[in-house]
Image (cartoon, rainbow, N blue to C red):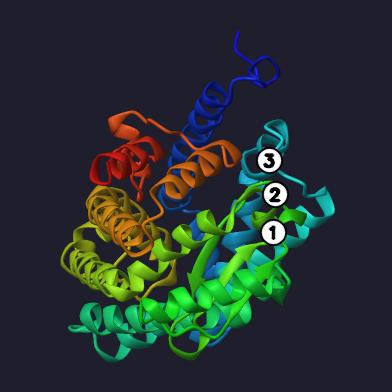
Amino acid sequence: MITVDNLKDNITEKAKLYSSIKYGLAIGQTVYLVLFLFLFESLGFSNILARNIQQLMLSDYYAVLLYIFIIYIIYYILSFPLNFYHSFLLEHKFLLSRQTIKDWFSDQLKGGIISYALTIIGLEAFYFILKHQPQNWWWIFSIFWIFLSLILAKLTPLIIIPLFFKYKKLSDDGLRERIIVLSAKMKIKILDVFEIDLSKKTVKVNAGLVGWGTTRRVILADRLREKYSSDEIEVILAHEFAHYKHKHLIKIILINVLITVLCFYLIAKTNGWVLRLFGLSSLRDIASLPIVFIYLILFGIIMQPLENVFSRRFEKNADLIALKTTGLKEAFVSAMDKLASQNLADRKPHPFIKLFFFDHPPIDERISYAKTVFH
């Protein structure tokens, strides 16, 4: 039997095992969530909860707050064993996590509060628009959803990331200056270059460009400089800058706009007969919320392969631009190798897995492409 212990010296096989477990758990958690929502609705629990909340004579605003809070708590308790194994035990088993149980619970609490707050904002807007624009709610709410996503992108480096990590300006002045010169060369305006204390949670490393407008900044994992050369870091960031330079993010947003509008249009046109199957009459009834969530999840699954195709194309293009801009082919190849080993990435996934799980080309494809284009 293959175990983690006897794979310590074989990174590729270890990564395959780790990835296989992660894929299985991701699929399992999605199926579990859909099943939970379906049973909660079909067995009448959602209706019972909604009617009991209505008896409290709360306003619609507070009724939604309470309903979502209760269903969140119920689902978190029921899914806790799977969640704990997936996000804590598995990461420790493969020696990828440095988190203590206390820190893990802290992150779970903060993540839960953020998720709850965003859900409430979305649902309150959903019910307000549905009430005042019953015929046109689907496209008006789609616009709101997109606007909210843009606001979150801007606020993430200011509010969300600092809740989980500590920022500090990059202390390596030489590397910092090199990154700033690269950003200027690629005509990307950045606030500055920062390090985050990622190593307190994981042995994995990463680098990226977050935020937009005045909040856009480079962030590096604090241990990145220990194992990656300046050339490797530069070509990694050139890839990130390429996304902004060639407006890949705007293109992804436009794709998401289309998908979002299609999803809510589908809900608007089909919710009547679906609601009747569960003995409900209107989307305005909070008892129908599990059905709305099921719509979003299933539509997301159906559209994920299409989103991934476009995303992988943009990633491949960003690799090409990064290589042309820096000329650092060997650094790119070595960086990809290191990232794959350190993060236990699946270098050559099954086509089905690639279709649904990979928004980047697999590492081996990226390396092969770099060697082919720049031979």
Q: Residues within 10 Å of mark 2 (few under 14, many from 20)?
A: some
The image quadrant where one finds the C terminus is top left
Choose between 257 and 288: the one closer to the eye: 257
| Position in image of residue 161 (x %, y %) | 63, 72
Q: Residues within 10 Å of mark 1 (few under 14, many from 20)?
A: many
Identify the disc placed on residue 79.
none
Q: CA distance from mark 2 to mark 1?
A: 6 Å
Q: Is residue 232 visible?
A: yes
The residue at 64%/55% (across/down) is 224
Q: CA distance from mark 1 to mark 3?
A: 12 Å
- Disc 3 is placed on an element classified as loop
Residue 201 sits above or below residue 253 on the image: above
Choose between 205 and 283: the one closer to the eye: 205
The image quadrant where one finds the N terminus is top right
Circle 1 is placed at which residue position? Answer: 198
Q: Is residue 66 visible?
A: no
The residue at 67%/75% (across/down) is 173
